[in-house]
Structure formats: C-alpha cells, structure tokens
Amino acid sequence: MGMFDDLQLLDAEQLRGRISMASAIAALQAAIREGFDPDDDPARSIVDVRSGQLLLMPADLGRFAGQKLGMVAPGNPARGLERIQAVYVLLDAASLSPVALLDGTELTSIRTPAVSAAAVDAVAVRDAERLVVFGSGPQAVRHVEAMHAVRPLREAILVGRDPERTARAVDAASRFGVAVRAGDATDVEGADLIVCATTAREPLLDERLVAPTATVVAIGSHEPDARELTGVLLGRSQVVVETLRVGTTEAGDVVMAIAEGHLERDDLVTLRQVMRGEVPIAGDRPRVVKTCGMGWQDLAVASLLGGTA
C-alpha cells in the first residue's frame, strides 16, 4: 500500500463544514488546560523568498503531528489573492504517516480568531458587548464570529482603510448575529473588546481612548519591527503573550515596548498562565493579548478532524 493511498484531501468548504469556531476555541482551551505547554512547541522557521516569506510550522500534540507551510506574499491582494496562504499536512503521531492534506489558508482563518477568543475568554469582562475591529480582511470578519462565541456582543464596528472592502467585510460579518457597521478609530472609546487584524507597521489607535476595562487583541504581525499598538498602551496594560520566547522575539508590539522602556520582560504573562488560572487577571487596567501564531494551535484545531479526516 502506498503512503498516499488513504490520504484525504480537505478543501476550505469541507473544513468549514467539519470544524466550527466554538469547537476550535474549545480544542485550544482543552490542550492548555489538559497540560500542554506551548513552550514545548518547536520553533517555526521563517524563510525570506523573492515574493515574501515561507513559514514552516511543525507540531506534535496528542494523537497527531503536523506541519503547516505558510506563504506570506504582500503583493497578493493586488492579484486578487489572499496575502497569507497555507497548506497543512496532518500526520499520525505514532507512524508519522500522512493522514490528510488540508487547506491551510482556511485552517488559519479558523485557528487565529479561535486563539484570540480562547485568550479573551480568560481575561475579558464577562459582559463585553461592544467590539471594534481594525481590518477588513478574512481575519477581521472571522474575529467577529470568534468574539461573539465567547462574549454576548451587541455591536461590532469594523475600521478599514478601503470603504468598499470594509463594506464587504461588514456584510460578511453580519451573518454572525451581531449588528455590524463601519466606523473609525475614535470608536475605540467605550469599546469592551478591540481587535487589530491588519498589515499595519505603525500604531492604529489612540491609547488614551482605551478604557481600563477593555481587552485589546493584536494579531496582525509576527515581525519584531512591526506593531499595531503603542508602547504606552502596553505599559499601562496587563500583557498576555503566547510564550515568553515568541513574545520577546516575534511580537513587534512587545519587542518595541520593552526597547522603549514602557514594559519589562518580567511584566509579561503567558496564555498558559491565564488559561490555567495561575495568575490573577487585572481588573484596573486594560488587558492586551498579542499573538503571532504557533504550530500547536493549528494542530489542535486540525486534530478535531480525528478519524473523519
């Protein structure tokens, strides 16, 4: 029997049909609460190529192992393609035989907001109703879905640079049962949840408008010289990172805030700590969640396919 005889090929539509946002969030929470330590996740490799970057993200968790090949091509939106694309190989953990080849772009579009929601569920006020999302791409849309899965949202406001693209994103996000409209950066004032899901390399919002009760999530960058939030905001907030290694090497918002003297490494808390209840959640200042993406997250979500893959 050949290695590929039983290999399943699952496209985006099939993944959407088999993995719900709620189940993805629960899978990530379960992995952490059942003892997985993200510090044990293999470091990903980022390789610069002529048109962008290749991200190699291996992981080994439970019954499965896996490898994501992510492709980041900044010129793709002008081609009508997504800026970030990926393929994912799901492997049997014991034999390392391929089990399934997945649309990694769709897997990422589920995984990233699910990680944000898993963190928000641990640190945000329970009655969060008002969400502001910076961005108008697939991640902005899916973050409305993910935030609504963990908090009783009544309103979501999308802030984008291109009015037509933002209008399309508002229309797409409206299917999640939340009132959605376009807005601007001043809508941050009074927001319970703020998500930054952009390609920005400079801060997007006035930190003075961020309420002490707010939770801010930044997912747009995995580069140490790009940021969506000011160092001042991180300095006045409880800052949650995936791991100290990732937070201090890949997360530009954190790296630059530390370099500017607004934040110290010892101030950081990890996703594992907050999700396992090992540190108190600040109630008198904002919570900032900064993620860059890790291999275990993709694998935890892909593993939901189990025997159906």
Image: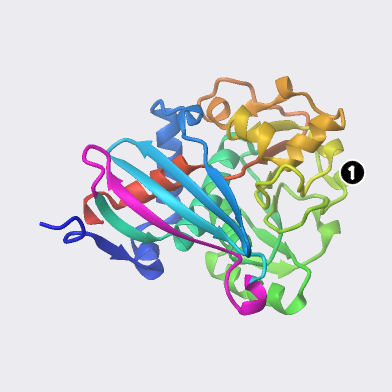
Residue at image location 26% in from the left, 52% down from the top = 98
**249 in magenta:** no
- Estimate the x, y position of residue 206 in percent, counting from the top left: 88, 49
Count residues near mark 1 (Cα–Cα under 10 Å), then give few for <14, some for 14-19, many for 20+: few
Residue at image location 58% in from the left, 74% down from the top = 81
- Residue 214 is at least partly visible in this image: no
The C terminus: image quadrant: bottom left
The N terminus: image quadrant: bottom left
- Estimate the x, y position of residue 36 in percent, counting from the top left: 42, 29
* 143 or 107: nearer the viewer: 107
**Is 271 situated above or below 80?**
above
Extreme-front residue of the structure: 50
- Residue 105 is at least partly visible in this image: yes
Residue at image location 37% in from the left, 62% down from the top = 15
**Residue 73 appears in which quarter of the rendering?**
bottom right
- Estimate the x, y position of residue 181 in percent, counting from the top left: 71, 69
**Residue 83 appears in which quarter of the rendering?**
bottom right
Residue at image location 32% in from the left, 64% down from the top = 10
- Left-right relation of 35 to 181: left
Badge 1 element: helix
**Is 129 situated above or below 278?**
below
Question: For the residue marked with disc 1, what is the amino acid?
Answer: Arg
Residues drawn in magenta: 76-97
Residue marked by disc 1: 208
- Estimate the x, y position of residue 302 in percent, counting from the top left: 37, 50
